[in-house]
Image (cartoon, rainbow, N blue to C red):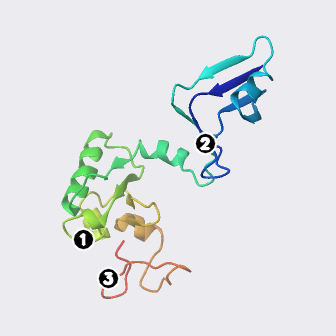
Amino acid sequence: MATLFHHGILLTMVDEDDRPESLLVRDGRIDFVGPLEEARALLALGDEEVDLEGRTLLPAFIDSHGHLLQHGMLSSLVDLEDTRSVEEIIAAFRARLSERDPSDRTPLIGAKYDPALLRERRHPTRDDLDQVSTEIPVFALHRSMHVAVGNSVLVDDAGLTAATPDPEGGRYGRRADGTPDG
């Protein structure tokens, strides 16, 4: 079975100026790209023609750096994307915490805050997140997902101290005395 696509913009991704008249797909693979009449000559009984009516057809994408699973996971976290102050981050965490069963000791995780959009123009600290809870771990992920902040429960449980060296290629935020600030 084959499908012939025509009368649209066919992007082959081969050359910027490549604009063939038609594209024939047979058994899930591109079988022909070129003039419409030549493509029609390759059709057999039962094959299908699709008039794109000016729409665009392009190859499927293979996203080698996709975060599809991560996006699904994010939907279950506290959404911090629209927060505009550290106070709003704390309020968002507190609101989610108030919805949970008081016996739930699982970490409270939020994501997508951006210090460039916060009134304070800084990351929250462990002291800020301690205002949410000093009993369960509270963890805020930056919108890049490459920076995060934890409350004192999380920092202490991880064993981070002033003597803890920064990880290779990264650094811990620190207070004036050298202890990690979250």
- The C terminus appears in which quarter of the rendering? bottom left
Q: Position of residue 53 (x, y in %)?
A: 52, 25
The answer to whether residue 130 shows anywhere in this view is no
Front residue (pair 90, 34)? 34
Q: Position of residue 96 (x, y in %)?
A: 29, 45
Image vertical order of residue 170 relative to residue 108, above or below: below
Q: CA distance from mark 3 to mark 1?
A: 17 Å
Image vertical order of residue 109 relative to residue 116, above or below: above
Q: Amino acid at mark 3?
A: Arg
Q: Position of residue 62 (x, y in %)?
A: 64, 46
Q: Position of residue 51 (x, y in %)?
A: 58, 22
Image vertical order of residue 179 relative to residue 52, above or below: below
Which mark sits nearer the N-terminus, 3 or 2? Answer: 2
Q: Which mark is residue 121?
A: 1
Q: CA distance from mark 3 to mark 2?
A: 54 Å
Q: Is residue 71 left or right of residue 15?
A: left
Q: Amino acid at mark 1?
A: Arg
Q: Which mark is residue 175?
A: 3
Cβ atoms under marks 3 and 1 closer than 8 Å: no
| Crowd around label 1: few <14 · some 14–19 · many ≥20 (10 Å) | few
**Which is more foreground, mark 1 or mark 2?**
2
Could you say whether the residue bearing mark 2 is in a helix, strand or loop? loop
Residue bearing mark 2: 11
Q: Is residue 146 left or right of residue 142?
A: right
